[in-house]
Image (cartoon, rainbow, N blue to C red):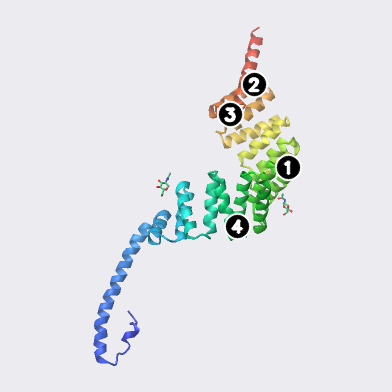
Amino acid sequence: MGTGPPAFTEVDNPASFADSLFVRKILTAAILGILLINVMRCIIRSNQWRSEEQLFRSALSVCPLNAKVHYNVGKNLADKGNQTAAIKYYREAVRLNPKYVHAMNNLGNILKERNELREAEELLSLAVQIQPDFAAAWMNLGIVQNSLRRFEEAEQSYWTAIKHRKIYPDCYYNLGRLYADLNRHIDALNAWRNATVLKPEHSLAWNNMIILLDNTGNLAQAEAVGKEALELIPNDHSLMFSLANVLGKSQKYKESEALFLKAIKANPNAASYHGNLAVLYHRWGNLDLAKKHYEVSLKLDPTAPGTRENYNLLKRKLEQLQKKSNV
Ligand SMILES: *[C@@H]1O[C@H](CO)[C@@H](O)[C@H](O)[C@H]1NC(C)=O
Ligand SMILES: *[C@@H]1O[C@H](CO)[C@@H](O)[C@H](O)[C@H]1NC(C)=O
């Protein structure tokens, strides 16, 4: 205790000096006591703060009317995948603070994932009304409007999001999906291209470009884009798979096989990888290997569309060959 409280500065008065000594003793004891209590509280606290969740829960009991605390508990639950509980806390956060745009955005997102689109749209519309430059909320609103098949509004929302956040690869990706839904293929390709310009490892955007070009019969372009993508992200097995499909259709069997095998090595349990490799062998005339990979594929996913039919087709062919060789 270097300096006492200002009340004890009148030291030239003896009576008051004696008094102050006595009061000082009491004060010192009190301060020591408070210190001790604080140390103990701190120990309890640090136990409470072992996990983020406990921290937020203890905050909740201290300040139950604080929207930010409810938001944090909700976010923590959502990060752990507990959506039902997260919704409850986000709702409370919005109730306590009706202008809480981040709580609205997160709540809207969860509701969107649970296909509660009407309420999701309401919340996200309100969020961007309150904060018109909230890019993420605009993008999420676009996704909801897209799901509600209100395509023009969705497009507007995506562009508004991009206006407010220049580097927004996911938004270009979603814009591309919207254009693809509308069969605006060139626009879709441009949007996905933009996504990959901003984020070269945007695997989903690359994949969609390859698949769209493949589905529309632009095999050469699909191949070029696939190779460009694999240069940038060489270990991405979904890209290997998409490009392998393109190469198979272009009858580049050897190259296609190598890529299928590489994709399977990276991701051995994808039924479609084995199924499509089987189709490649089937077309190529390598029937034993085709049989083997159809069987692996059916084991991984007995309901894979088309695979059972292809497999039965192959078995009939093998039986016929058997008969011929027996004759
Ligand atoms: C979700 O969180 C709530 C509240 O904390 C809890 O009661 C419930 O058991 C959790 N549910 C799951 C599936 O973890
Ligand atoms: C792609 O980006 C360019 C350059 O920023 C922009 O002019 C164009 O409108 C964008 N197109 C799409 C479909 O995203």
In the shown orientation, is residue 88 left or right of residue 162?
left
* Amino acid at pointer 4: Val
Separation of marks 1 and 2 at Cα, in angstroms? 37 Å
Q: Which is nearer the N-term, disc 3 or disc 4? A: 4
What residue would you read off at disc 2? 287
**x and y, in percent, of residue 168 in the image:** 64, 54
Q: Are marks 4 and 1 in contact (CB under 8 Å)?
A: no
Q: Position of residue 74 (x, y in %)?
A: 46, 53
> Could you tell me how far apart the alpha carbons at marks 2 and 3 are, in whole angstroms?
20 Å
Identify residue type, mark 1: His
Q: Are marks 1 and 2 in contact (CB under 8 Å)?
A: no
Residue 146 pos. (x, y %): 63, 46
> What x and y, as percent, mark residue 259?
65, 35
- Binning the other alpha carbons within 10 Å of mark 2 as few (below 14), some (14 to 19) or many (20 upward) gives some
Q: Local crowd at mark 4 within 10 Å, few (<14), some, or many (≥20)? A: many
Q: 127 or 113: nearer the eye?
A: 127
SS category of the residue bearing label 1: helix
Depth check, mark 1 against mark 3: the one in front is 1
Total numbered circles: 4
First reached walking from the N terminus: tag 1 or tag 3: 1
Which tag, 2 or 3, sits closer to the chain's start?
2
Residue bearing mark 4 = 128
Left/right placement of residue 120 relative to residue 7 reads: right
Mark linked to residue 185:
1
Q: Are marks 3 and 4 in contact (CB under 8 Å)?
A: no
Give the spatial CA distance, label 4 vs label 1.
Answer: 29 Å
Which mark sits nearer the N-terminus, 2 or 4? 4
Q: Which residue is mark 3?
A: 304
The CA distance from mark 3 to mark 4 is 42 Å
Instruction: Inspect the image, locate mark 2, and give the three-letter code of the amino acid beneath it.
Output: Leu
Which mark is first along the chain, 1 or 4? 4
Q: Which residue shows up at 45% across the image and 51% down it?
A: 88
